[in-house]
Image (cartoon, helix red, strand yellow):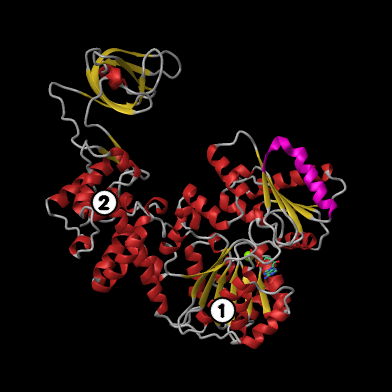
């Protein structure tokens, strides 16, 4: 049913609802409240509690405006048990006139402590006439809003939708109940929706607010099942496509390994074997390789690239930053020979770029770059494999776009995705249910866990001592400046200032500087110098966050670490501890430290385990952020909180295939109910 069929919703309002993803009346029912307000009973003023919302009713005893440039309207109302002051910083003259002593008022708002009287600032209120309007008979739901759509409009629209449902004018299929799939203890869909949108006053409010009420759990189970179904479909869709079979030639792979300065870990071997098996199939590989920072993902990717190159196919490696792409290009040139690698840098001049594109088009086997790889102008001759490094830094759509790029008719390239952000099991089962997952669960031998200390800025002299000591031993150090949320220019300036200060403080050290404002060649020159050991202390912005690999660096100092998130700090710290000497990380913070920041820093101090850190991160930030897909909204849950609702996953995993097998069309409808934009994603 179209939304505009409802009273009070014209085209313009309809558009605004559409921006919330609400296009049909049915969608309204799944726009669920954030919280509830209790307007079912009037509270005696003498029993009001501070900082809680309340509905009160009484008579105006006195009304006045304060004097001054910004007059405030104050109306004191009493119900005989106590008096409360209603305050309005903005008001109309007519409003003031109507607040006569004796006027009867009903007001809803948060009660705040104030002297001489408790107050409500800008409460909602109405004047009571001879007859009093009835009190609400259920709790008032408060919905997520959008620009230009008031709470009232949303509430009324949902109430109408509920009415349509109850009168049978709107039919809403209950996919679980119809098919006898509803787990015991959970209500049917109508009952659940009624309880959520119109909870009776006696409902278990704390449970409702916590999202653990059976009515909510019922909907959450639907949502998770829809996600699982959507991912299964995405996977089936990809597997229905054709990909070139690529074989990893054992002789060639052995020869390659002989050229490496190290031997692969068991975990690396295992993952290479999994990849090789996938590549040797007629449908595209979709494999996610998880491995903590420093676990050696690059060489695993190289095995896949070797297989592609040997098979006469091209492989594209996409990195999230220019710096990392450059580093990969250098590594690959060492491993495969410069003639076999094209680096598509944004820093190339016109002529160089043309030449690079020409080499890509003529079939040079390995192509490395940032997301610029999937620009229109880049044409591959025969792309057989796409590798995305540090996937969490890209949106889903960028990834899909690159895969799309290599498609030729119905043929699509194999896809390998690498991430150092380990994904907790619960997330992997939903958001990544369309991928096969390999884990490099072992670090190269000889690595020592980085020891981490958390220090207040006031302890700077201690830090200076550590830097001196490390550099005196011939080791190297990073100093990371963390000005965030400012322009690249300000960040660069802050880093330059710091570099200058540190150069003064450590005249005996060679201090280098790298930030996002440097030209690509300049950045590379600095990184090369650091790698070569010609710089002792590298001052950097967070541009060095991902991938940068300088094994001789053993000390990492992060300024204002309290400003960064867990995943980012863990990544940064991963820049050290890459060789076999003991490495240290100093997290500096500016006191006082907030509670969440303290938790974050403490987690890092205690743990080097990416999985453990990711679990805490998931708890603190939620799945959308952790996956880096928030902006796309594609993998965002509306209701489910995987930490809280993880227990429903197994149930959803059980239900999804049953629904898909027995009632494929219903599965389809269920997906559309919860993921209206799913098709866009699937066809991207
Ligand atoms: P990440 O998983 O963080 O991408 P890299 O691929 O950058 O890790 O590898 C980190 C460092 O470890 C590199 O210097 C790499 O050459 C080295 N390395 C990789 N595998 C091994 C191994 N099996 N033994 C020793 N060193 C290794
Ligand atoms: Mg890496």
Task: Please identify the quadrant where the N terminus is shown.
Answer: bottom left
Element carrying mark 1:
helix
Q: Does residue 369 appear in this view? A: yes
Task: Give the image quarter of residue 598.
Answer: top right
As displayed, is residue 545 above or below residue 680?
A: above
Residue at image position (60%, 51%) is: 607
Q: Secondary structure at mark 2?
A: helix
Q: Residue 289, located in which quarter of the rendered image?
A: bottom right
Q: Which residue is mark 1?
A: 273
Q: Residue at x 68, y 54 (%)?
A: 450
The quarter of the picture where residue 197 lies is top left
- 1 or 2: mark nearer the eye: 1
Instruction: Provide the residue span drawn in magenta.
Output: 454-473
Residue annotated with mark 2: 28
Residue 192 locus on image (x, y percent): 23, 50
Q: Which mark is residue 117?
A: none
Is residue 676 visible to us here? no
Determine the residue positioned at 20% across, 64% down: 180
Q: Is residue 468 magenta?
A: yes
Q: Earlier in the sequence, mark 1 or mark 2?
A: 2
**Which residue is at the far right?**
508
Q: Quadrant of ligand 2?
A: bottom right
């Amino acid at each position: 049913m179209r939304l505009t069929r409802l009273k009070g919703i014209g085209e313009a309002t309809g558009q605004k609802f559409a921006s919330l993803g609400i296009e049909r009346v049915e969608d309204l029912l799944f726009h669920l409240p954030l919280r509830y307000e209790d307007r079912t009973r009037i509270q005696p003023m003498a029993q009001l509690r501070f900082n809680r919302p309340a509905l009160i009713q009484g008579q105006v005893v006195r009304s006045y405006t304060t004097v001054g440039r910004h007059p405030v309207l104050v109306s004191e109302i009493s119900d005989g048990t106590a008096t409360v002051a209603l305050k309005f910083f903005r008001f109309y003259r007519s409003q003031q006139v109507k607040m006569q002593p004796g006027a009867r008022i009903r007001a809803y708002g948060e009660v705040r402590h104030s002297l001489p009287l408790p107050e409500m600032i800008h409460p909602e209120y109405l004047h009571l006439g001879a007859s009093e309007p009835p009190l609400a008979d259920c709790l008032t739901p408060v919905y997520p809003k959008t620009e230009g759509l008031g709470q009232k409009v949303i509430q009324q629209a949902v109430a109408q939708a509920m009415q349509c449902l109850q009168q049978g004018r709107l039919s809403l299929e209950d996919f679980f109940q119809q098919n006898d799939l509803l787990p015991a203890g959970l209500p049917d869909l109508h009952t659940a929706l009624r309880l959520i949108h119109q909870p009776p006053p006696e409902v278990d409010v704390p449970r409702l607010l916590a999202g653990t009420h059976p009515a909510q759990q019922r909907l959450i189970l639907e949502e998770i099942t829809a996600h699982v179904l959507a991912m299964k479909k995405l996977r089936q869709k990809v597997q229905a496509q054709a990909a070139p079979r690529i074989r990893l030639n054992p002789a060639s792979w052995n020869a390659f390994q002989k050229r490496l300065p190290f031997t692969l870990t068991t975990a690396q071997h295992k993952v290479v074997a999994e990849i090789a098996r996938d590549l040797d199939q007629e449908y595209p590989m979709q494999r996610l390789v998880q491995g903590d920072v420093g676990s050696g993902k690059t060489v695993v990717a190289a095995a896949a690239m070797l297989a592609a190159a040997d098979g006469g196919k091209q492989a594209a490696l996409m990195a999230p930053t220019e710096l990392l792409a450059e580093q990969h290009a250098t590594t690959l040139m060492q491993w495969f020979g410069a003639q076999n690698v094209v680096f598509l840098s944004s820093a190339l001049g016109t002529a160089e770029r043309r030449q690079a594109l020409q080499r890509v088009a003529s079939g040079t086997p390995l192509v490395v770059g940032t997301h610029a790889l999937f620009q229109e102008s880049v044409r591959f001759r025969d792309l057989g494999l796409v590798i995305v490094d540090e996937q969490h830094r890209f949106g889903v759509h960028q990834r899909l776009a690159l895969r799309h790029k290599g498609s030729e008719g119905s043929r699509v390239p194999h896809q390998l995705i690498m991430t150092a952000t380990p994904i907790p099991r619960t997330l992997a089962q939903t958001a990544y249910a369309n991928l096969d997952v390999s884990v490099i669960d072992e670090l190269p031998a000889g690595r020592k866990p980085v020891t981490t200390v958390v220090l207040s800025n006031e302890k700077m002299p201690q830090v200076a001592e550590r830097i001196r000591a490390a550099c005196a031993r011939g080791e190297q150090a990073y100093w990371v400046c963390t000005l965030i949320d400012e322009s690249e220019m300000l960040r660069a300036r802050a880093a330059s200032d710091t570099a200058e200060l540190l150069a003064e403080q450590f005249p005996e050290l060679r201090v280098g500087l790298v930030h996002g404002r440097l030209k690509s060649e300049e950045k590379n020159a600095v990184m090369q110098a650091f790698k070569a050991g010609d710089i002792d202390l590298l001052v950097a912005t967070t541009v060095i966050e991902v991938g940068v690999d300088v094994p001789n660096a053993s000390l990492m100092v992060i300024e204002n670490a309290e400003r960064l998130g867990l995943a980012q700090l863990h990544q940064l710290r991963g820049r050290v501890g890459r060789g076999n000497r003991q490495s240290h990380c100093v997290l500096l913070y500016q006191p006082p430290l907030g509670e969440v920041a303290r938790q974050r820093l403490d987690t890092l101090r205690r743990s080097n385990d990416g999985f453990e850190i990711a679990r805490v991160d998931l708890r603190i930030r939620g799945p959308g952020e952790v996956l880096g897909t928030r902006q796309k909204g594609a993998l965002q849950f509306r209701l489910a909180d995987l930490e809280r609702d993880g227990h429903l996953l197994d149930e959803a995993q059980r239900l999804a295939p049953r629904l898909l097998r027995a009632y494929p069309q219903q599965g389809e409808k269920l997906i559309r109910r919860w993921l209206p934009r799913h098709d866009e994603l699937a066809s991207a």
